[in-house]
Image: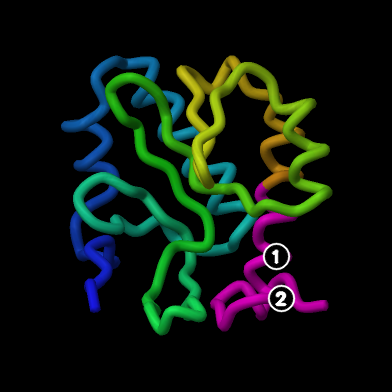
Amino acid sequence: MAKTKTKETEADVYEFINSFANSEQKKKDSFELIEILQDITGEEPKMWGPTIIGFGSYHYKYDSGHEGDAPILGFSPRKAAFSLYIYSDTEKSNSILSDLGKFKMGKSCIYANKLADINISALKELCIESIKYINEHNECSCRKKYSK
């Protein structure tokens, strides 16, 4: 069975942003996203793999038997656009997307060119909905803040 490649590391989040983000605006947006996601989760930012900044963690196990750990919320300041790992496919999340702003949707990832394209209130609401979903379906560090 394949092993999960994206794991929490000891790399410095701020060094990563300063060396990886390809513009001053992307750096500024990254630091703002850290504040937003840290405030929502109550967790410190950690590097997951070489390019993902994650907050908290949860353990997942699929019916196939594949299992691993992942950040509860996260993002990466990629060259073309931010990859936001903040989405769970729920009815409420899907309704929030209509207010989110200018973005593209991947399978479980939201791509936004810059933070100014995003409605921050909708982003926060989407994050909270995702945490609630993860809390209900997985064993996670979010239980202490977002229990039923």
**Distance in Å between CA atoms under marks 2 and 1:** 5 Å
Position of residue 34 measured from the top left corner of the image (x, y, whole percent): 47, 43
Position of residue 141 measured from the top left corner of the image (x, y, whole percent): 55, 77
Mainly helix, strand or loop, the magenta region? helix
- Residue 98: in magenta span: no
Residue found at the very far front of the displayed protein: 64
Judge by depth and name the residue closer to the eye, 10 or 104: 104
Judge by depth and name the residue closer to the eye, 131 or 63: 63
Query: Image point 44% across, 60% down: which residue?
Result: 44
Q: In the shown orientation, is residue 94 left or right of residue 44?
A: right
Asked if disc 2 and disc 1 are in contact, CB closer than 8 Å, the reply is yes
Query: Is 20 above or below relative to 69?
Result: above
Q: Amino acid at mark 1?
A: Tyr
Query: Image point 35% across, 32% down: which residue?
Result: 77
Query: Is 44 above or below relative to 62?
Result: above
Circle on res. 114: none
Check disc 1: other Cα within 10 Å, few if <14, some if 14-19, many if 20+. some
Q: In the shown orientation, is residue 59 left or right of residue 128?
A: left
Q: In the shown orientation, is residue 46 left or right of residue 129?
A: left
Query: Image point 71% across, 75% down: which residue?
Result: 136
Position of residue 96 measured from the top left corner of the image (x, y, whole percent): 79, 37
Q: Amino acid at mark 2?
A: Glu
Query: Is 68 above or below relative to 97?
Result: below
Q: The magenta stretch spans which residues?
A: 127-148
Circle on res. 133: 1
Query: Is 55 above or below relative to 136?
Result: above
Residue that badge 2 annotates: 136
Which element is circle 2 on? helix
Point out the image quarter for the C terminus: bottom right
Position of residue 81 measured from the top left corner of the image (x, y, whole percent): 39, 23
Query: Image point 33% across, 48% down: which residue?
Result: 52
